[in-house]
């Protein structure tokens, strides 16, 4: 299937002349797709004539230089079994872990806490609850929790505030996520929640859960325990690559 997708991708494009710089290429294709703001347009190395378009929210599409075909999907290298498109998305969405606003989060630690990560979560998000179920199967992590209520969940902001204003935020969060026990109503300065939403939107986080490894890689969505365990192992090193 992966080989077929790559072959299909190559077959759909026409051989294009690599004339012109990146700016003129972007401007030319923007005229072709006026309703789609294009962040960048660059030729894909190793596939003559194929152009990568980075559009809103760091989505990637492919086209040819003339812009008369659009390809939606991922490119795989069958020799290495690497998802080249996902690798590129990881680079585009990578954040500087050290610059996360930790003062607006709380921490949940399990075991020695040697594997550190952050999560932007919504207490009413069903996928966030799935993530919590999988986290219960792991034995070693340090999780920085950023409350990130989504507007599609009407009661989420109030619940986020209740958790944030609890004497023990981590315990209140886990009790709700694992047992459905609502925290007692408390009053405090919960402006951190609004700041989290603003930070997330500025940095391309629009859904939950968003898991951020210590090396800055962002995983959008929940992961089953084995994949989550692998993700934490792979992202534990605090090495940050610059976006290109």
Image (cartoon, grey):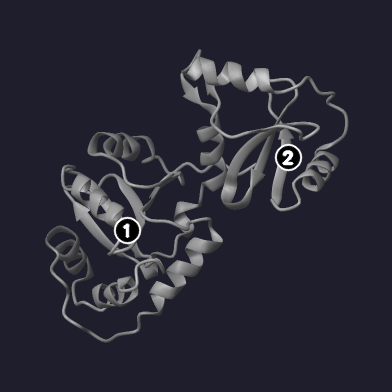
Q: Earlier in the sequence, mark 2 or mark 1?
A: 2
Percent of width and height locating residue 41: 73, 39
Report if residue 46 is visible in the image.
no
What is the crowding at mark 1: few (fewer than 14 residues within 10 Å), some, or many (at least 20)?
A: many
Q: Give the distance between the C-alpha atoms of the residues marked 2 and 1, in whole angstroms.
A: 35 Å
> Measuring 30% from the left and 35% from the top, which residue is drawn there?
227
Residue sitting nearer the eye, 100 or 82: 82
Residue sitting nearer the eye, 239 or 17: 17
**Mark in the foreground, 2 or 1:** 2
Q: Which residue is mark 1?
A: 144
Q: Is residue 126 left or right of residue 19?
A: left
Residue sitting nearer the eye, 15 or 69: 69
Which residue appears farthest toward the top when viewing the image?
A: 79
> Measuring 57% from the left and 52% from the top, which residue is drawn there?
57
> Measuring 67% from the left and 22% from the top, which residue is drawn there?
12
When the figure is inspected, residue 168 is found, relative to residue 117, above or below; the finding is below
> In the picture, residue 185 is in which quadrant?
bottom left
When the figure is inspected, residue 176 is found, relative to residue 114, above or below; the finding is below
Q: Is residue 20 left or right of residue 8?
A: right
Secondary structure of residue under mark 1: strand
> Measuring 38% from the left and 69% from the top, which residue is drawn there?
103
Q: Is residue 137 left or right of residue 43?
A: left
Report if residue 235 is visible in the image.
yes
Q: Which residue is mark 2?
A: 41
> In the picture, residue 138 is in which quadrant?
top left
Percent of width and height locating residue 78: 50, 15
Q: Quadrant of the C terminus?
A: top right
The answer to whether the residue labelled 2 contacts the one labelled 1, judged by CB atoms less than 8 Å apart, is no
What is the crowding at mark 2: few (fewer than 14 residues within 10 Å), some, or many (at least 20)?
A: many
Percent of width and height locating residue 18: 83, 26
Percent of width and height locating residue 81: 46, 19
Secondary structure of residue under mark 2: strand
């Amino acid at each position: 299937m992966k080989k077929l997708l790559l072959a299909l991708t190559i077959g759909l494009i026409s051989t294009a002349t690599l004339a012109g710089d990146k700016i003129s290429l972007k401007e030319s294709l923007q005229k072709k797709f006026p309703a789609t703001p294009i962040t960048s347009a660059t030729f894909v190395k190793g596939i003559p004539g194929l152009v990568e378009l980075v559009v809103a929210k760091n989505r990637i599409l492919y086209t040819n230089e003339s812009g008369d075909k659009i390809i939606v999907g991922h490119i795989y290298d069958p020799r290495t079994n690497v998802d080249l498109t996902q690798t590129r998305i990881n680079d585009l969405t990578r954040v500087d872990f050290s610059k996360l606003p930790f003062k607006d989060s709380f921490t949940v630690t399990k075991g020695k806490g040697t594997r550190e990560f952050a999560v932007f979560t919504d207490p009413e998000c069903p996928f966030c609850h799935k993530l919590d179920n999988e986290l219960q199967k792991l034995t070693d992590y340090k999780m920085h929790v950023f409350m990130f209520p989504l507007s599609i969940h009407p009661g989420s902001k109030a619940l986020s505030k209740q958790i944030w204003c609890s004497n023990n935020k981590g315990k209140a969060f886990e009790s709700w996520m694992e047992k459905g026990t609502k925290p007692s109503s408390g009053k405090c300065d919960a402006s951190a929640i609004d700041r989290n939403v603003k930070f997330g939107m500025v940095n391309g986080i629009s859904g939950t859960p968003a898991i951020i490894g210590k090396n800055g890689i962002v995983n959008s969505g929940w992961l089953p325990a084995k994949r989550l365990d692998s993700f934490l192992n792979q992202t534990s090193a605090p090495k940050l690559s610059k976006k290109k």
